[in-house]
Image (cartoon, rainbow, N blue to C red):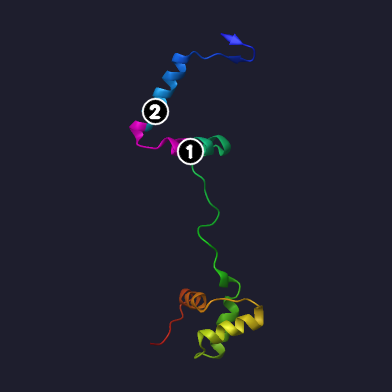
């Protein structure tokens, strides 16, 4: 059977391997593509699951929260557009008013209706 540095695998054995593989895929209900992805992940890392370092996109205002908070404490009735302008002047960062509003909400600030 050996021919050089490799073995010639008979066609019947290759077909058997394919049938067993497909049978396993059908029995589990997992697509062939997903199986290939999991096998590739396992071969490259030794783990079947890829763990991400961080989930989601990082918040823009995390570094500027202090500046926003101090501006609000100085003037409690400040408008979002004024905060936006102050951030642009002080830090040269153009942030949308919606982003500022969401950051304030995360920090526990609410608005009067």
Which one is in front, 51 or 27? 27
- Disc 2 is placed on an element classified as helix
Q: Is 61 placed above or below 4 here? A: below
Q: Is 7 placed above or below 37 here? A: above
Specify whether residue 29 is painted magenta.
yes
**Pointer 2 residue:** 22
Quadrant for the N terminus, please.
top right
Residue 96 as seen in the image, left or right of residue 4:
left
Estimate the x, y position of residue 103 in percent, counting from the top left: 50, 75
Picture residue at 56% right of the left edge, 84% below the top: 83
Estimate the x, y position of residue 66 in percent, counting from the top left: 59, 78
Mark 2 or mark 1, whichever is nearer to me: 2
Estimate the x, y position of residue 10 in percent, counting from the top left: 49, 13
Quadrant for the C terminus, please.
bottom left
Specify whether residue 82 is painted magenta.
no
- Furthest-front residue in this view: 11
Picture residue at 45% right of the left edge, 38% below the top: 33
Which one is in front, 111 or 25? 25
Q: Is 76 placed above or below 59 here? A: below
- Dot 2 or dot 1, earlier in sequence: 2
Q: Which residues are magenta?
A: 26-36
Picture residue at 46% right of the left edge, 19% below the top: 14
Picture residue at 51% right of the left edge, 84% below the top: 80
**Pointer 1 residue:** 38
Label drawn at residue 17: none
Main secondary structure of the magenta stretch: helix
């Amino acid at each position: 059977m050996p021919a050089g540095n490799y073995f010639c695998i008979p066609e019947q054995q290759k077909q058997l391997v394919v049938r067993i593989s497909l049978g396993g895929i059908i029995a589990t209900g997992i697509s062939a593509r997903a199986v290939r992805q999991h096998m590739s992940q396992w071969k490259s890392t030794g783990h079947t699951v890829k763990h991400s370092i961080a989930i989601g996109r990082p918040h823009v205002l995390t570094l500027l929260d202090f500046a926003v908070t101090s501006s609000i404490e100085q003037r409690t009735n400040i408008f979002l557009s004024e905060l936006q302008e102050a951030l642009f002047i002080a830090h040269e960062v153009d942030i949308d008013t919606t982003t500022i509003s969401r950051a304030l909400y995360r920090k526990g600030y609410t608005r009067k209706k």
